[in-house]
Image (cartoon, rainbow, N blue to C red):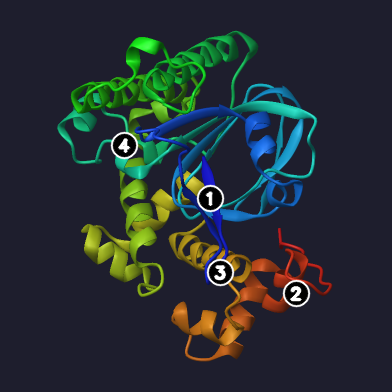
Amino acid sequence: MMEILRNQVQEIRYRPEGLYPYGLEVFRVSDLRLRTSREGMRRTYGYTFYMLILVTEGQCNQTLDFQPISDVAGSLIMVRPGQAHNFGECEAWDGWILLVRPDFLWPTSSRENLRSGFDIERFPAGVRIDAKDLERAEYAIQWLRHDAARNDESSSERARHDIGKSEEFIEHMQSHLRYGFYALVSWIAITYRDKGLDDLRKRPALRRFHHFKALVEQHFVDWRSISTYASEMGCTERSLTRAAQDAEGISAKEYVLRRLGLEAKRLMVHTDWPVGVIADHLGFKEATHFSKFFRRINGCTPQQFRSANGHGGSGRCTVPE
């Protein structure tokens, strides 16, 4: 399933058990608890894969990129590679986990993706599925698990006639699982889409924001000026800021700064790097400048944040409103 690595950057990588050959793995949260220590379940980690977590019973409080999320049956969380996630301390809940390797997904520019018009990167971070649709979602997930198990040598669900299937069979099953996964997530995205986005007048600004968001993910360390993004996108700074305001309720400049602040928090938690090293990594000439920036964005010093998130010592961190 997953392997915890304790090196310079703490992360969890995709490590399927046995001879499992596919890029999609489906199992219960309760299954993960049987294979992971209680301490391990309560830590905050980054992942090298996508993870969908669907709560089916009970209540829990998970965190995603240091923001608390209160979950009940029907809550679905999408965790992306690099994000900081914590399952929380509560154990009185269960649900499904879908682990998805990035190379399992269609490239954004692929013909299939263009035809379907669905981009996994635009899937919302959180969705609340109603009771009727939860039944449908669970049914689809269970079939994905059943089909994936047909060629899993480590699974008790594997049918005897599936032993030693050819590479062609595995390739076809991988494709089948991929279509099944996209059918599930695209149905959820369509059913629970933001109805405000149906306004045709907002679509150009929304496309502009998604373009801006993609550029920020690539260049937030080096590109701090909004004029650089606007020039790259072929639009004015005013139209870019308006797009960010419509999509996120903040200016484009503030969006870039918050993304930089989020990366700082991830590095403070996932590494043991000194503050000065993190400052240099994020493009700050002086550690003091970085500390001032961190306090403005996050409401506490880097040392306080690191202590408050499990690196020993004591510290309190209050994120500003």
- Under mark 3, the amino acid is Leu
Distance of mark 2 from mark 1, alpha carbons? Answer: 29 Å
* N-term mark: 1 or 3: 1
Element at label 1: strand
Element at label 2: helix
Residue 63, image x, y percentages: 67, 47
Q: Residue furthest left?
A: 111
Element at label 3: helix
Q: 61 or 123: which is nearer to us?
A: 61
Mark 2 or mark 1, whichever is nearer to me? 1
Which quarter of the figure is the C terminus placed in?
bottom right
* N-term mark: 4 or 3: 4
- Under mark 2, the amino acid is Gln
Question: In this orientation, does residue 204 appear?
Answer: no
- Under mark 4, the amino acid is Leu
Q: Residue furthest right?
A: 314
Q: 238 or 106: which is nearer to us?
A: 106
Residue bearing the label numbered 3: 267
Residue 132, image x, y percentages: 60, 8
Q: 229 or 49: which is nearer to us?
A: 49
Residue at point 44% right, 81% down?
Answer: 283
Label annotation for residue 105: 4
Is residue 268 depicted above or below 82 in this figure? below
Q: Is residue 198 left or right of residue 127?
A: left
Distance of mark 1 from mark 4, alpha carbons? Answer: 21 Å
Label annotation for residue 304: 2
Q: 219 or 177: which is nearer to us?
A: 177
